[in-house]
Structures are given as C-alpha cells and as structure tokens.
Image (cartoon, rainbow, N blue to C red):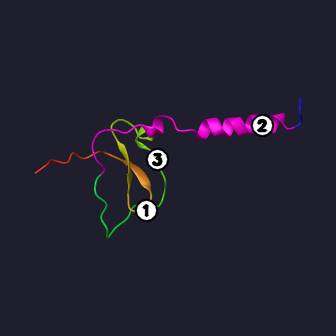
Amino acid sequence: MSRYFPVFVALIVVVAVSAPGTDAQVKSGSCPPVDPDAYGPCVEACSGDGSCPGNQKCCSNGCGHTCSPPIKIIPL
C-alpha cells in the first residue's frame, strides 16, 4: 500500500461527513421576521431545517442561524 493511503481515506471520510444529507430537508411554515433593530447570537446553531428538532426551522436571527418554531402566514 502507498504511504498516502491513510490521507486518501481521511479525505473520503471528510467528504462523506460534509456531504448534504437531512439538513437539505425543507419543513413547512415560514421563519419569523427578524427585527432590524435587534439581532440574535452570532452562531450557526443549525445548517438547514433538517438539523432542527420536530417542526422547527433553521432561521436567520439577524446575525446567525438558530432553530425556531415556524409561523403561518395568513394571506389577506
């Protein structure tokens, strides 16, 4: 075996772990509006709706993204 085989295996693992999966799921509802005069913590607590529990969605908080309960928009 080549001395680069462990590096190749590590690269394959990194690509497989970072590939899109359930995070690509889009859940129903909408994210709550962001108050332009306030912002939430500057953290990326989720990477897509699929990374949030239950029916929560991955929403912008003005600086980062966090899981939030969806809101329903009622058409006028």
**Which mark's residue is nearer the viewer, 1 or 2?**
2
Q: Say what amino acid the circle numbered 3 marks.
A: Cys
The residue carrying mark 1 is 63
- Give coordinates of residue 34: x percent, y percent: 31, 60
Contact, mark 3 vs mark 2 (Cβ under 8 Å):
no
Helix, strand or loop at mark 3? loop
Residue 8: mark in rendering: 2
- Give coordinates of residue 5: x percent, y percent: 83, 34
Give the residue displayed 30% in from the left and 45% down from the top. 69
Helix, strand or loop at mark 1? loop
Helix, strand or loop at mark 2? helix
Q: Say what amino acid the circle numbered 1 marks.
A: Cys
Q: Is residue 37 above or below residue 20?
A: below
Compared across the picture, whether 50 is left or right of 15 comes to left
Residue 46: mark in rendering: 3
For disc 3, the neighbor class at 10 Å (few under 14, some 14 to 19, many from 20) is: some
First-in-chain label (3 vs 1): 3
Compared across the picture, whether 50 is left or right of 16 comes to left
**Which mark's residue is nearer the viewer, 3 or 2?**
2
First-in-chain label (1 vs 2): 2
Q: CA distance from mark 3 to mark 1?
A: 13 Å
- Give coordinates of residue 28: x percent, y percent: 29, 39
Q: CA distance from mark 1 to mark 2?
A: 36 Å
Prevailing secondary structure of the magenta residues:
helix
For disc 1, the neighbor class at 10 Å (few under 14, some 14 to 19, many from 20) is: some
24 inside magenta stretch: yes
Task: Please provide the residue range marked out in magenta.
Answer: 4-31
Q: Residue furthest top?
A: 1
- Give coordinates of residue 56: x percent, y percent: 34, 42
Q: Say what amino acid the circle numbered 2 marks.
A: Phe
